[in-house]
Image (cartoon, rainbow, N blue to C red):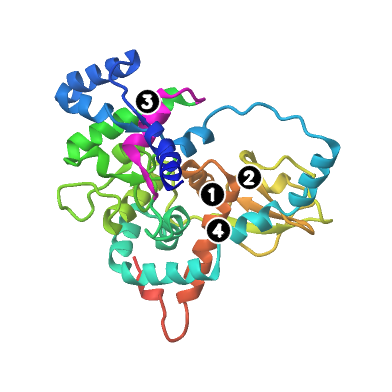
Amino acid sequence: MKKVVIILLLMPIMMLAKDYREEKEVIKFIDRLVKEYRYSKSSLNRLFADVQIQQVPLRAFTPKHKIKRTPAQIARLKRLYPKYGAWDRYIKLKITPDRVKRGAEFLKKHKNVLKIAQNMYGVPMEYIVAIIGIESVYGANVGKYKVFDTLSTLAFEPNRRNKFFKNQLFKFMHLAKKEGFNPKNVYGSYAGAIGLGQFMPSNYEAYGVDFNRDGRITLQQPEDAIASIANYLKKNGWRRGEKVATRVRYRGNRFRGYKTGYRTLYHQSKLKGIELREEWGYKGRVSLIKLNKKSYDELWFGAKNFFVITRYNHSAYYAMAVHQLAKEIKSKIETPKNSILSLYEN
């Protein structure tokens, strides 16, 4: 009986390994790596001879067939996932007391590097820390998937983003050659993102900074991760000294007066029926960001820098979580006994 159980347990593991060496697309891919980055063909053949197929990432990017549900199933889903309260559920996962506390500790620990990066790139240190907090819980969760196997799976197994992941795998292999590491030894997210800031390989190459000057860009190290995130935001349009967002008021509990979302911009003076809750001194055009709560919609003005955060992750909820976590972290350490004001001196 025990032998049967052992065989059944081993079968799924054995089935995950795949030899890609004879596949036409992989052969072309290997030839390109040899030509452009001077990899040895034999070393690449060894890599692609034993790729562990990553089922979880593959399911995430495989088109799903529309499921027909019965009225009873639809009613149950509505109970489990009510129409209102999306922001309540989202923020409960992203901003917790523990994440705020650890963010304040991370900021204090790396305050000197953060201050230099803030002065160099113009991005307030609490926003850099907030992104690291949301992306990897300050380095505690950089991902459990082997990046080479994940990107190979998503590059060559059928899914809706094959072309994108083939490019990411190519960039990753270039990075491995340039930085001198074994591609099999790097772990990341289910999509192949790497390090404290969860950079995709193409962003690693485009925005990565060797801030500790050790001759390598290593985004698993706080110094390089901090500067690389700041560099990313600056190159995507961050404006030094400008606001990010401010909450506004309107009549009623649900907002339907104007189109919301970070892509739509308005002149503030033309938004009738919307009032600032506090003076914020921003004169540029704004987006209207609606946060769907259980009892009402929270409404915010998003400035240019809010839009810049969405370049990191194309989600208004993500950008607002970064903004609010940054404010919570800053507030956590601004106390009479432990003032952070000196850290913000330029």
Question: Disc 4 or 1, which lies upstream in sequence?
Answer: 4
Name the one closer to the observer, 252 or 179: 179
Question: Disc 3 or 4, which lies upstream in sequence?
Answer: 4
Quarter of the image that includes the C terminus:
bottom left
Q: How crowded is the residue under tag 4: few (<14 C-alpha within 10 Å), some, or many (20+)?
A: some
Residue pointed to by mark 1 = 306
Question: Disc 4 or 2, which lies upstream in sequence?
Answer: 4
**CB atoms at circles 1 and 2 under 8 Å apart?**
yes
Q: Is residue 183 above or below residue 300?
A: above
Question: Disc 3 or 1, which lies upstream in sequence?
Answer: 3
Amino acid identity at mark 3: Lys
Amino acid identity at mark 2: Ser
Q: Nearer the viewer, mark 4 or mark 1?
A: 4
Say what secondary structure mark 1 lies in.
helix
Q: How crowded is the residue under tag 3: few (<14 C-alpha within 10 Å), some, or many (20+)?
A: many
Question: Disc 1 or 2, which lies upstream in sequence?
Answer: 2
Residue pointed to by mark 4 = 94
